[in-house]
Image (cartoon, rainbow, N blue to C red):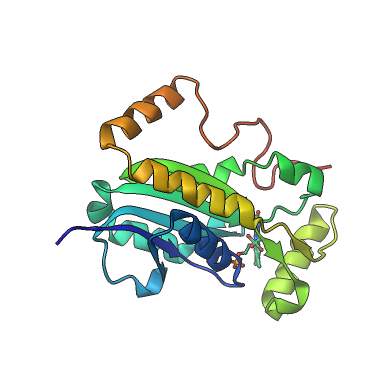
Amino acid sequence: MANKLALVIYDTKYGSTEQVAHWVAEGINDADIRHVDDVTSLFYDLIVIGSPVYNEAPSTRILAFLEKYRDSLANKRLAIFTVSLPYNMTPERAKGYAGARILEELAGRVKGNIIDKRAFLGKLEEKELTSLDRLSLRIQYFLKGYRLKDANYLDRDAAIAWGRRLFELATRAPEAVTTERKDRKMGGSTGVPERKGDGQREEKK
Ligand SMILES: Cc1cc2nc3c(=O)[nH]c(=O)nc-3n(C[C@H](O)[C@H](O)[C@H](O)COP(=O)(O)O)c2cc1C
């Protein structure tokens, strides 16, 4: 039986990574979508993995999944994305956001052929948070000289556009993708703008 085109796998606590996963799947056009705990098959040409960022790390469920299926994923085309919201985000910063650090950490855990990766911004709504998360974030923000406040940087168009890009890459011959990755290593566009000091929580205004 032929593989299906694409599967988008995500974890989420407050819904934003799930939302981004749905938009990405919409852009791919013919993608299945599953929470990381409900994955039953990896018979797809492309596996997209989306992780939220909590406490400067990817989701532990996603990391456990990558570990468990390390060998099965090793010969697959993969794409990965993170959804995060650094404490110092502003609409200005959001425009050039790369979020490279956690995304690179996640990519480092994967053995497969990563055809593309992307850091998306998410949202935070104080009233949705568990009391423990609210307290912990309030303390972390306070220690860094910021005040926790609601923010929503979800970008539907960007997520759908990335899904479309993945569709193009996934339906290309494997050699074409490999060549493009080599080109990128030699200085071409990575899809993730490389800007110094644009880590998840490294800048301070
Ligand atoms: C407890 C907690 C810790 C977080 N820690 C970070 C962090 O270290 N870096 C970051 O960029 N965003 C952090 N965030 C923001 C989340 O990444 C952001 O709200 C994201 O949209 C959450 O994804 P979800 O809605 O799929 O759960 C944190 C959020 C929570 C609730």
Q: Locate the N terminus and report the quarter of the image it occupies.
A: bottom left
Residue 63 lies, with reference to residue 135, above or below; the image says: above
- Image point (55%, 54%), residue name: 160
Question: Is residue 27 visible in this depiction of the protein?
Answer: yes
* 92 sits to left or right of 11: right
* 187 sits to left or right of 1: right
- Image point (38%, 41%), residue name: 169
- Image point (35%, 45%), residue name: 170
Residue 138: quarter of image: bottom right
- Image point (83%, 59%), residue name: 142
Residue 177: percent from left, percent from top: 34, 34
Which residue is farthest left?
1
Residue 107: quarter of image: top left
Q: Locate the C terminus and report the quarter of the image it occupies.
A: top right
Q: Quadrant of ligand 1?
A: bottom right
Which residue is farthest front?
29
